[in-house]
Image (spheres, grey):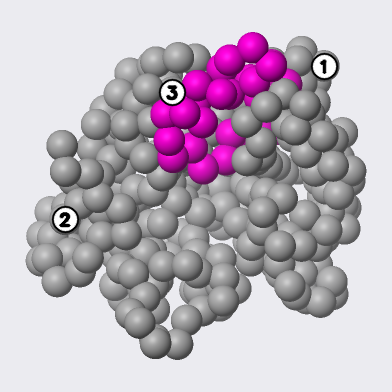
Amino acid sequence: MIPKRSYGKKGDKISIIGLGGIVLARLPQKEADALAREAFEKGINYFDVAPTYWDAEERMGPAIKSFRDKLFLACKTTKRDAKGAQEELENSLRKLQTDHFDLYQLHGLSKMEELEQCFAPGGAMETFLKAREQGKVRYIGFSAHSEEVALEAIKRFPFDSVLFPFNFVTLFKGNFGWELLKEAPKRGMTLLALKAMAATHWKEGEKRLEKCWYKPITDPKLAELALRFTLSLPVAAAIPPGDENIFRMAIPFAERFRKITSREEQRLRAEAEGLTPIFSRTA
């Protein structure tokens, strides 16, 4: 079975890989049901979804109905105002056929202006705090594609978790993520990883995978090494790419997880030199 790690301060345990809702998007419902059940039976109890993932919420709701109470279910909103966030929260709860989310997140913070809007009077954080009081949300978190914004966000509020791209190329070549890896745990925040199995940007004209805006690693040996690297960082879990075949490829990697060795890390450093990171930080 897939190992589990601690999340938050209420005794929750989550599988070291999660099922990203985009994996179920645009699948026939029977296929979505089977894939969600397969993941659950393999020991994956961390499921993450968002309204922006096409029809993922509609597919996931029926797919997890019979075992919802055994899941750590996370959702997100891109709305930065209280009214918009409230409407989206209620829509997501309805589509997921649940009365609460274990984790609700500000989705994809990338600019300081967005952060300011969330915390301003009438901002999304008002909805988040109210929802937590009402029992519709157990934990509050955010995801970000900017390290500067993420670092500012964790100073503003005691978030329970941060969902962020932690990847060998972005860290070694892009200098992206190191500071957050240090600062968030100091504040008692759980780190969750995106993009662990990302390689680089797609090239012009290259045949792309519909559910991956970046080019994922498809070589199984390198993909496993990349995932093991991320899971050897101080993170609780990683969400593999949204392509269903690559997600399935990641399941046995998680089942046989072992911490990365220094020699393997050196190999990844060398590999990163030949790749352009999908995120980078110059400072």
Image point (39%, 86%), residue name: 206
Give left or right: position of 102 versus 159. right
Other residues around mark 1 within 10 Å, as few (<14) / some (14–19) / many (≥20): few
Q: Which residue is mark 2?
A: 173
The answer to the question of whether label 3 and label 2 lie on touching residues, with beta carbons closer than 8 A, is no
Q: Which mark is residue 134?
A: 1
Give the residue at x 49% y 37%.
109
First along the sequence among labels 1 and 3? 1
Q: Is residue 161 visible?
A: no
Residue 78 image point, x, y percent: 63, 40
Furthest-front residue in view? 113
Which image quarter holds the N terminus? bottom right
Amino acid under label 1? Gln
| Quarter occupied by residue 76 | top right
Q: Secondary structure at mark 2?
A: loop
Asked whether, in this view, residue 103 is left or right of residue 197, the answer is: right
Segment tinted magenta in the rendering: 102-128
